[in-house]
Amino acid sequence: MSRSRPLRLLLTAALTAGLVGACGAEEVDAELGVGDLRGLYPAPAPPVATATELPGEAAYASSVGLLAGGGSVSADADADADGTTLLATDRGLVAYDPTTHEERWRTDVAGGVCALSEVVDGRVALLLDARGTYGRCDRVGVVDVDRGALRWSRPLGDAEYLFDRSVALGRDRVYAGGECGAVLTFAVDSGAPRTPLLARDVVCGHANAMAGGVVALYEDGETPDTPDDAGTGWIPPSDGAARLRVLDAADGSERWSTTVERRGADLHGIVSAEPLVLDVSQRGHRTMRRYGPGGRFLGHLGAQLGPSDGFTVVARSGDVLVGTYEAIGGYRAYDLRTGQELWRVPTTDRWLAGADDDGLVWTQPARVRGDPDGPTWAIQSQVVRTSATDPADAVLVGALPGDDVTAGSVLGDDLLVRDAGRTEVLPLGAGVGPAPEPWTYAAGAVPWADGDVRPDGLADVCASVGRGALATVGLRTDLPAPVDCHWLETADPAYLDAELQVDVEAVAPEAGIEGSQEAVTAADAARARYDDTHRRWPDLTGLGDAARTRTTQSADARRSSAGVEVLAGNVVVRVGARVEAQISDTLDGVVPAADLQRVVTRVAEDVLADLDLPGATPDLPGPGAPGPVGAAPDVCRLLADALPAAVPADRRTDLSAGEAVSTCRWEVPSGRSGTSLTVTAFAVPAARVADRQGRVRSAVAVARGLPGAGERYPAGGAGAWFSDTSDPGEYVSQVLTLRRANLVVTVDGTAFEEPLPTDLGADLVRVGRRVLDGASRDVPDATRR
């Protein structure tokens, strides 16, 4: 026996401690003997089938990027009458016989194929990049499936504005996404351009999606009241209606259309063509919406999506749709007819390759018995088939060629894999026996203790957040919970941001390594994680094993936030909330920091309760004393005779909102944008806020000096901040913030006139102090609080 043999056996025995369970070392030696440890592992699975290397592997080997569920490859299993299978790659299009796997033809394209339509009447439409500029698919074409000839190709426009990679084929026309969401159409036979289904507009407001014979359009182009005619996108759309349309690609007929509120609306894609499920945003919230005949809304599918993190469909078997959320990973399955979630697999021990007629097809690593003259065990790449409704019902199909194959893609009745630079196809046969559990590193060796919360126990933590907490922050309560527990409101109302984020971590124990590292319990590991963050936050008693909290409110009263962090057993809970007004008009929507503090602590309590962890009502500080100013002064009245010469009083607009906020705006349109002055007075309410020493004060007292109002401005006196974002020679943009007690006055001046004012700030100070002085001469200066 070689000198390395005893070491290998020792390591193997340590790694398999979880597999032998209660069987002690003496029992293993007595029953099997040290040299027979390989008997603890199952025999290697037989091969799935004889692998056939696809022709032209040198040209196509680098293109199998869809194997893991993403990348530049589009795998299309649709077949024509001859049963041809098409494979789109980043080198072109190849067709092969699904039975013999012999190549029938190929069409080389320098930059590859981005998308394929369905096969209609022996033809397929495709998006391609004929110039080889990596991903800039700016042409559309049609290929005859029987012989692989590219009948024609036409340009779609400037690739910088081709946002929607969509293509569909009808009986007499081809649909393709054009610039800025436009939908162009071409004659199938000749490629002659036809009247666009949706023409480009100057604001890039349209969007489209195509799949399964369905063409979906979101129409939101230029209107007389469109505020952003340059397409910059930073100005929210004005109130009004856009249109969502669904058409049949076969003949271009409209199935249905409906109007949608255009603020915060968009179309992201088609999740399912039949029954119809669209990935859309409405009022700033992205969800998967189910539609019935006539466009009737049937309900949501799954969780709320993030602005940039969608849901990727990986497989479909009948009415069961399986996919992965980009924000969290794992797999979830849904019944498309009812919208019900059927199951979820939060880990990535198995990789879903797709579905065939017999169910879902997965690949996984498995630990199997080693060769008699080799190591005790080995890792084998295996193919497993499960029921579409129950992923635990697994049958072993066989082994893949090679040990490093961890993913695949189902095309028809075949499994396409990549192994050592080769693209291979394997026919999928019937099962050969029960499937083993997938192997994970150090499986069974992690020393979990009774009472520890496992990571898979956090699956529904987002549901712990109650409707009351969401409503207090200003968030929607009629939508599914976000998949990542991050609620965000930016579109309704506009210019007022509100968010609530919940992060729950079940910290795992750490296995020891003899001679170098001691084992760490899950509770101790969680304590270390808790101690490493936010050490300067004030402690909060009565919640979990340990807790701390913090609140902030900006000096100009435009931003408030609160956070809490809790340790309970091996779980760390972090909850944060923020509300911020982007403009003075929405100041009254800023929730006091103390209210946000009550929200985040209540959410933390509910999370602990749902996890059966200890928690109690936290000891929050009492309310702060109300300030001397109970209502905002009438800004328009106070400044009727105190405006700068460039701002005539007759061009004013009163934008006041309630008793707490008074806003007056003066505008003089001329030149490029003219001159404007906006003055806002805000009577900040009292709040239950504690500083770092635990002393209770009003919100503005705690906020003094915090970010949000620019730099301190001595020329404005005590309690003054100044912000200057001017561009010399182009425009002047300055904001002054003044505060006395709980009264905050903001003066925002902008000028585009020539010559530009050299000292707009002096006018701002004079205007702001007129409001402060006129509000109440008895209000003390902020520095004396």
Image (cartoon, rainbow, N blue to C red):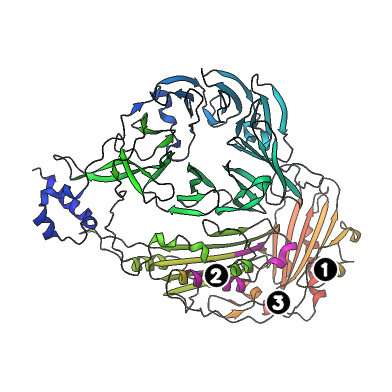
Is 691 drawn above or below residue 71 in the view shown? below
For residue 635, the mark is 1
Residue positioned 38% across, 23% down in the render: 100
Measured as percent of width and height from the top left, residue 53 is found at 35, 26
For residue 600, the mark is 2
Q: Which residues are magenta?
A: 578-607
Q: Amino acid at mark 1?
A: Val
Evaluate whether residue 136 shows in this view: yes
- 438 relative to 538 in the view: left or right: left
Where, quadrant-wise, is the C terminus in this rendering?
Answer: bottom right
For residue 741, the mark is 3
For residue 277, the mark is none
- Give yes or no for contact between labels 1 and 2 (Cβ–Cβ under 8 Å): no
> Mark 1 or 2 closer to N-term?
2
Front one among 381 and 524 = 381
SS class of the residue under badge 3?
loop
